Structures are given as C-alpha cells and as structure tokens.
Image (cartoon, helix red, strand yellow):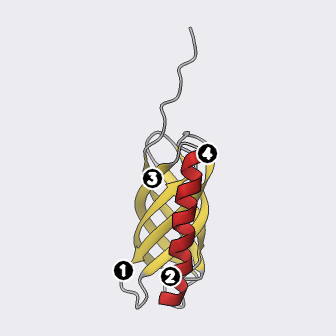
Amino acid sequence: MKKKLLPCVSALCLSLSTVGASADTTLFAGINILFGDVRSPSYGVTVKVLSNNTPEEVVASLGASYYFGKADPFGFDLGAAYSTSDISVALGYDLLQGGLVAAIGTAKTAKKAKAPE
C-alpha cells in the first residue's frame, strides 16, 4: 500500500504546483461511491482539485478519497468534473482502488459575468 501511495502523493503535489499557475483552480468536497470492488460498492468522502472554477464547464479533476469499512481505505483518482453554481459532480478512475468512482459535492465557482443591458 505504501509503495502505491508515494507515487500518487508525488503526482498530486506536482499537479497542484503546476495547475495553479495556469488556471483558476478550485477545491471540491463531497461524497463518493467506488464501483468495481469485489464486494458491493464502497462509499466514502473525497476532496478534489478542479482545473478551473468556471461554472457549467467540464474540467479535469484530481482527488483523494477515504472509503469507509475497507482494509485499504485510501484512494487517489483522476477524472472529469462538471460544476454549476450550486452543485458539482465528478467521474473518474481510482488508481489505488482500481475502479470507477463517482462523486457529488460542492465547489467554489466563479460568478458568471452579467451580460450588458
């Protein structure tokens, strides 16, 4: 487990340092469900970095998760997310757990500019 976690944490740190310089990133927090486990789906909590804070756009996501009731409870995922002004959803692949992960939560998005009247 520790051998898998180190490259993932390194990739997360590198991504956070480079993505922040090129776009207005934002944080996502929510609940998630992991599919592809031997048992029934696993549920957990997640925190992600979204590549852009613009609402109503599909953006890249990079996240870390904690799954309840698993022997190896941590996850690291890459995927895509879509945010509105109220809610955000994400879909990706968990590299540590080896399965598809879906999440719903909230992210701070930029306010849409009002059209001139």
How far is mark 2 from mark 3, CA to CA? 21 Å
Query: What residue is shown at x 50% (from left), y 56% (from top)?
Result: 49
Q: Nearer the viewer, residue 58 or 95?
A: 95
User: Which badge, 1 or 2, is on the more N-terminal residue?
Assistant: 2
Residue flagged by tag 1: what amino acid is it?
Answer: Phe
Q: Which residue is mark 3?
A: 27
Q: Residues within 10 Å of mark 3 (few under 14, many from 20)?
A: some
Residue flagged by tag 4: what amino acid is it?
Answer: Ser
User: Which badge, 2 or 3, is on the more N-terminal residue?
Assistant: 2
Residue flagged by tag 3: what amino acid is it?
Answer: Leu
Q: Residues within 10 Å of mark 4 (few under 14, many from 20)?
A: few
User: Which badge, 4 or 3, is on the more N-terminal residue?
Assistant: 4
SS under mark 2: helix
Q: Which residue is mark 4?
A: 22
* Most distant residue in the top direction: 117
Q: Which residue is mark 2?
A: 5
**Viewer-nearest of labels 4 and 1?**
4
Residue 22 placed where, x, y %? 61, 45
Q: Nearer the viewer, residue 71 or 1?
A: 1
